[in-house]
Image (cartoon, rainbow, N blue to C red):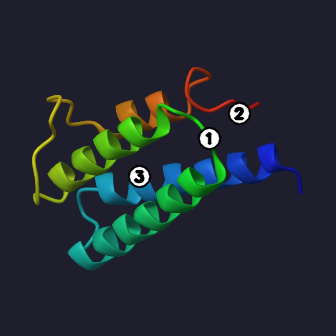
Amino acid sequence: MNTSMELLSKLTILEELIQVISIENATKTEKYHAYSGVLALLREIDETTNAPCFGEHSRDLKSALLKKLELGTDSQGLHDPAAYFRKLKSPQCLDVE
């Protein structure tokens, strides 16, 4: 499997985990497990990608997710993790086909 396909696969899983965290009727345990998965995937993507903007967007995404989990504040005032995810996978940050 080439790197682009692996990255695309990881981003797809990441998006699904973010959706779990955003589901209102999901249990806290489900949300925390999804958040743990998000952290692991972000770390893995960061280690295999040399995108300079990745760190900033992943920090913002984690902050927004913590806000969803009611454990932190979002530094930029965006409360929608999907907005940060879109920034993260944009062509300006990660080159994904």
Give me the residue at 11% from left, 60% from top. 71
Image coordinates of residue 66 in percent, x first then y, are 20, 55
Mark 2 or 1: the one toward you: 1
Image coordinates of residue 8 in percent, x first then y, are 70, 45
- Label placed on residue 96: 2
Label 1: how many Cα within 10 Å (few below 14, some 14–19, many 20+):
few
- Label placed on residue 50: 1
Which of these two is toward me, 69 or 6? 6
Q: SS class of the residue under badge 2?
A: loop
Please tell me whether residue 91 is drawn above or below residue 32 in the rendered image: above
Label 3: how many Cα within 10 Å (few below 14, some 14–19, many 20+):
some
Q: SS class of the residue under badge 1?
A: loop
CA distance for labels 3 and 1: 26 Å
Give me the residue at 57% from left, 20% from top. 92
Image coordinates of residue 82 in percent, x first then y, are 39, 37
Label 2: how many Cα within 10 Å (few below 14, some 14–19, many 20+):
some
Mark 2: amino acid: Val
- Label placed on residue 19: 3
Could you tell me if the residues under marks 3 and 1 are in contact, i.e. CB atoms within 8 Å? Answer: no
Q: SS class of the residue under badge 3?
A: helix
Position of the C terminus, as image quadrant, is top right
Mark 3 or 1: the one toward you: 1
Mark 3: amino acid: Gln
Please tell me whether residue 54 is drawn above or below residue 31 in the rendered image: above
Dot 2 or dot 1, earlier in sequence? 1
Q: Residue furthest bottom?
A: 29
- Label placed on residue 91: none
CA distance for labels 2 and 1: 13 Å
